């Protein structure tokens, strides 16, 4: 229970306030079932007059004492009944508190489950982040590979150009050597023709034709070699260009696929992060609304309980005050009756059923200022005896409660 109070103090306080409210409701209903009772003087009712303007005093009889004792017994029984009802209310409040504690424990378990789900989602986000970093690393490695391929392609182009240059130089060298050999043969033939010009004129013509044929053949061979070298260089360059174009297309396709995959992963990660952020915001808003609602309910329950407590306290204070005034009034009436009776001298021939109602004027110390007969049985002798008894009792007893004091009181004197 203490651990629950430490985790959720507001909820526990709300539960305790609710239990207190239920208990005060039961007490309030019990106390307000009885109507307020009026102060009775000389057996007559004085309803709704806690402080009467006039006090009628009479002698206290045995029946009045018994009635007062019975009234006190009834009040004790009512108090015991209220105590039993209060005990039942406490038991009901305790049961409600236990039910509230069980509900709060269920809410705590639900909160822990939500926290575990949030942790799992955070782990998923961390896994997505690692996947994104791996994709970034793969992309960097792919770019390094592509850079290596580009370097290889440039190296191949340089080698192709170097090979074409070498073939061209080789062809030119062979052509020069062939031309030198031809020139050497021509010089030898010229020397031979010079020695044998006469004998070989016909042979010269034939050899000249052969020479021209050889030269034509050499030219054609040289041109064919140069053409073949050019075609071979062009073929190699074309094949290299096609290979590089294919590799470039494949690279671009791979890069596009990787970019699309990366964008898709980023989009999913972003959507998941946004969804989690929305859910977190909604959860916090919901928790904030629940917290505000709980605090508002607790505040209202607390205020209602305080108001109810104050009303009950005021009611109890009023009832206690009323009872104190009633007791003081009864004691005051008895004191007046005893003071006057102790100073009364019974005239001869007084009937026991006679009574005399007089109005007494007094100061704050109880000194009698005037006595006026309002209604009286018997003759002047009986009236005079009552007036003399009142004056002789001066100063009259004063009430224990100052608010019961009146400067003029109506006093009803009875013989018996």
Image: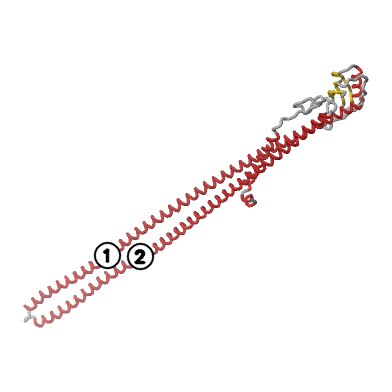
Q: Residues within 10 Å of mark 2 (few under 14, many from 20)?
A: some
Residue topped by disc 1 = 239
Residue topped by disc 2 = 149
How many numbered discs, if any?
2
Residue at point 63% right, 52% down? 3
Q: Position of residue 147 (x, y in %)?
A: 38, 64
Residue 240 or 200: which is nearer the viewer?
240
Residue at point 43% right, 54% down? 266
Q: Position of residue 385 (x, y in %)?
A: 91, 21
Q: Is residue 156 above or below residue 397?
A: below
Q: Is residue 70 above or below residue 98?
A: above
Q: Is residue 68 visible?
A: yes
Q: Position of residue 193 (x, y in %)?
A: 10, 80
- Image quarter of residue 45: top right
Q: Is residue 329 visible?
A: no
- Label 1's element? helix
């Amino acid at each position: 229970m203490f651990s629950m109070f430490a985790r959720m103090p507001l909820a526990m306080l709300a539960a305790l306030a609710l239990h207190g409210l239920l208990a005060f409701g039961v007490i309030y209903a019990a106390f307000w079932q009885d109507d307020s009772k009026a102060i009775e003087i000389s057996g007559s009712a004085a309803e709704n007059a806690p402080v009467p303007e006039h006090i009628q005093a009479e002698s206290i009889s045995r029946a009045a004492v018994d009635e007062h004792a019975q009234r006190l017994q009834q009040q004790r029984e009512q108090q015991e009944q209220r105590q039993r009802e209060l005990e039942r209310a406490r038991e009901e409040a305790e049961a409600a508190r236990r039910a509230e504690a069980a509900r709060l424990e269920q809410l705590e378990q639900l909160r822990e489950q939500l926290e575990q789900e949030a942790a799992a989602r955070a782990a998923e986000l961390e896994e997505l982040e690692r996947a994104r970093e791996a994709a970034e690393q793969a992309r960097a490695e792919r770019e390094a590979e592509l850079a290596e391929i580009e370097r290889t392609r440039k190296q191949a182009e340089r080698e192709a150009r170097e090979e074409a240059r070498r073939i061209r130089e080789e062809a030119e060298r062979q052509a020069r050597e062939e031309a030198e050999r031809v020139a050497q043969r021509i010089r030898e033939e010229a020397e031979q023709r010079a020695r044998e010009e006469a004998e070989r004129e016909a042979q010269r013509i034939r050899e000249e034709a052969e020479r021209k044929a050889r030269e034509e053949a050499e030219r054609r061979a040289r041109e064919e070699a140069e053409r073949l070298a050019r075609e071979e260089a062009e073929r190699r360059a074309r094949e290299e260009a096609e290979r590089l174009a294919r590799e470039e297309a494949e690279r671009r396709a791979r890069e596009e696929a990787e970019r699309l995959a990366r964008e898709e992963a980023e989009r999913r990660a972003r959507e998941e992060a946004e969804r989690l952020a929305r859910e977190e915001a909604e959860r916090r808003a919901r928790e904030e609304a629940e917290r505000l609602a709980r605090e508002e309910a607790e505040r209202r329950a607390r205020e209602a309980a305080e108001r109810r407590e104050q009303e009950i306290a005021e009611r109890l204070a009023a009832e206690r005050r009323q009872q104190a005034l009633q007791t003081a009034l009864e004691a005051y009436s008895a004191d007046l009756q005893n003071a006057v009776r102790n100073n009364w001298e019974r005239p001869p021939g007084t009937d026991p059923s006679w009574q005399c109602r007089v109005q007494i004027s007094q100061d704050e110390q109880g000194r009698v200022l005037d006595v006026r007969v309002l209604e009286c049985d018997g003759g002047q002798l009986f009236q005079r005896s009552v007036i003399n008894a009142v004056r002789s009792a001066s100063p009259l007893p004063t009430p224990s409660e100052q608010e019961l004091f009146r400067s003029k009181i109506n006093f009803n004197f009875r013989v018996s």
